[in-house]
Amino acid sequence: MIVLVMGVSGAGKTTVGARLARDLGWVFVDADDLHPPANIEKMRSGKPLDDQDRAPWLAALAARIAQLLDAGRDAVIACSALKAAYRAQLLVDPARMRVVHLTGDPALIAARLAARKAHFMPPGLLQTQLAALEPPEDAIRVDIDGTPDEIAAAIRRVLGL
């Protein structure tokens, strides 16, 4: 099974996803690690990515998901996956994948972004992510008002893991 943990920057995808993977003994993949350097620099300079910027990144992530599924490996993937079209590309095998949408108060997310150190995503881009977000109807929605351990435990409960 692949669990895609999605949401806007600052929602806790990496922290919660890594906890979830650790707790389950699964592989963890942070989609941010697959961004080409040009994407990182663009975001670092305060410019949002467009669909053209995201295309090679999404293709690389979809290929990684396919590799994991082909190898029979369970994994947690942390990825913004803001638009339905992005999720459609990433859901390589919907029968073996689940989407978890981390949601929360934008003020809480903004505070988390402001507190982060050494991350390429500036807090000023939160509004562009919120505007681009197409909330999935069929995802497991989990509120981020809790500790990472509590959120990971809530996801495990809903998934029955």
Image (spheres, rainbow, N blue to C red):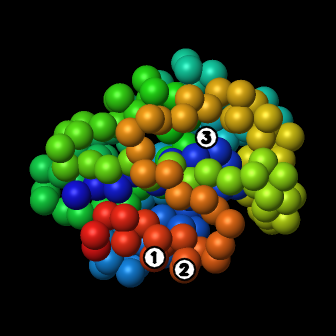
Q: Is residue 84 visible?
A: yes
**For numbered disc 1, what is the local secondary structure?**
helix
Is the residue under label 1 in contact with that under label 2 (CB below 8 Å)? Answer: yes
**Could you classify mark 2 by the number of other residues whose Cα lies within 10 Å: few (under 14), some (14-19), or many (20 or more)?**
some
Label 3 sits on residue: 37
The three-letter amino acid code for the residue at tag 3 is Pro
Residue 73, which numbered label? none
For image coordinates 41% across by 44% down, the residue present is: 139
Type of the residue with mark 1: Ala
Circle 1 sits on which residue? Answer: 153
Labels 2 and 3 touching (C-beta < 8 A): no
Residue 18 on image: x %, y %: 48, 70
**Is 88 situated above or below 113?**
above
Question: Residue sitting at 17 percent across and 44 percent down?
Answer: 95
Quarter of the figure that contains the C terminus:
bottom left
| Residue at the spot 19% in from the left edge and 62% down from the top edge | 73
Query: From the viewer's perspective, is the residue at label 2 or at label 3 nearer?
Result: 2
Mark 1 to mark 3: distance in Å?
34 Å
Task: Determine crowd level at label 3: few under 14, some 14-19, many 20+ residues with C-alpha closer than 10 A.
Answer: few
Please give the label number shown on residue 149. 2
Give the left or right position of residue 123, taking residue 102 as reference: right
